[in-house]
Image (tube, helix red, strand yellow):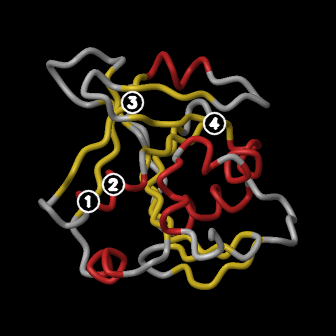
């Protein structure tokens, strides 16, 4: 079996952005090392990596995406703009989003920081449905099909209520 070629850089950003269709409320501010978008007046930094098997000797169900250390993340850490780390499951056309507050705390802490998911959960995501899950350590993540990008963002503060604290529009 040939090793799968994972998307990275422009192709994975294109895949992500295609989930918005022609939505007029989306503005792409920059797409250099990380993506900076404005969605209905709210800015987000987005970093994307493919989700893959955690590696041997772990079961195939154990999946992860690794967040690398990057100089740009120092700027992100100091910013008031929300930062989302999303993993992409190419086999299922599913995105996994980890708790943005926990991700931000772990930016540039090590060369690579791993965030986990489970293949069986990724396999079971249905169109039109956004799923939430929790790891044994209590860390929450959200899974959704690419076609459900807008519903995910419309409900992001339901899934991650602490984002409200960083929303400049919240009184």
Is residue 52 shown above or below 88? above
Discs 1/3, front = 1
Q: Residues within 10 Å of mark 4 (few under 14, many from 20)?
A: many
Q: Residue 145 sits in which quadrant?
A: top right
- Return the x and y of residue 37 as percentages of the image width and height: 62, 75
Q: Are marks 3 and 2 in contact (CB under 8 Å)?
A: no
Q: CA distance from mark 1 to mark 3?
A: 19 Å
Q: CA distance from mark 3 to mark 2?
A: 14 Å
Give the mark nearest the N terminus, 4 or 3: 3
Q: CA distance from mark 2 to mark 4?
A: 18 Å
Which residue is painted at 63% across and 68% down in the image?
170
- Secondary structure beneath dot 1 equals helix
Discs 3/2, front = 2
Q: Any mark on residue 117, and which?
A: 3
Q: Are marks 2 and 1 in contact (CB under 8 Å)?
A: yes
Q: Are marks 1 and 4 in contact (CB under 8 Å)?
A: no
Give the mark nearest the N terminus, 1 or 3: 1
- Return the x and y of residue 153 as percentages of the image width and height: 68, 53
- Return the x and y of residue 31 as percentages of the image width and height: 55, 79
Disc 1 target residue:
105
Disc 4 target residue:
144
Give the mark nearest the N terminus, 1 or 4: 1
Disc 2 target residue:
103
- Return the x and y of residue 143 as percentages of the image width and height: 56, 34
């Amino acid at each position: 079996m040939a090793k799968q070629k994972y998307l990275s850089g422009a192709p994975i950003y294109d895949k992500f952005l295609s989930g918005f269709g022609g939505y007029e409320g989306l503005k792409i501010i920059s797409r250099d090392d990380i993506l900076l978008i404005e969605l209905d007046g709210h800015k987000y930094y987005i970093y994307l990596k493919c989700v893959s098997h955690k590696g041997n000797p772990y079961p195939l169900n154990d999946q992860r995406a690794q967040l690398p250390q990057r100089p740009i993340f120092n700027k992100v850490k100091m910013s008031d703009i929300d930062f989302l780390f999303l993993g992409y499951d190419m086999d299922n056309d599913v995105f996994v989003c980890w708790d943005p507050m926990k991700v931000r705390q772990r930016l540039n802490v090590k060369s690579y920081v791993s965030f986990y998911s489970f293949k069986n959960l990724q396999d079971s995501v249905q169109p039109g449905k956004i799923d939430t899950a929790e790891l044994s350590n209590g860390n929450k993540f959200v899974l959704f099909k690419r076609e459900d990008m807008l519903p995910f963002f419309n409900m992001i503060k339901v899934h991650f209520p602490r984002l409200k604290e960083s929303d400049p529009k919240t009184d």
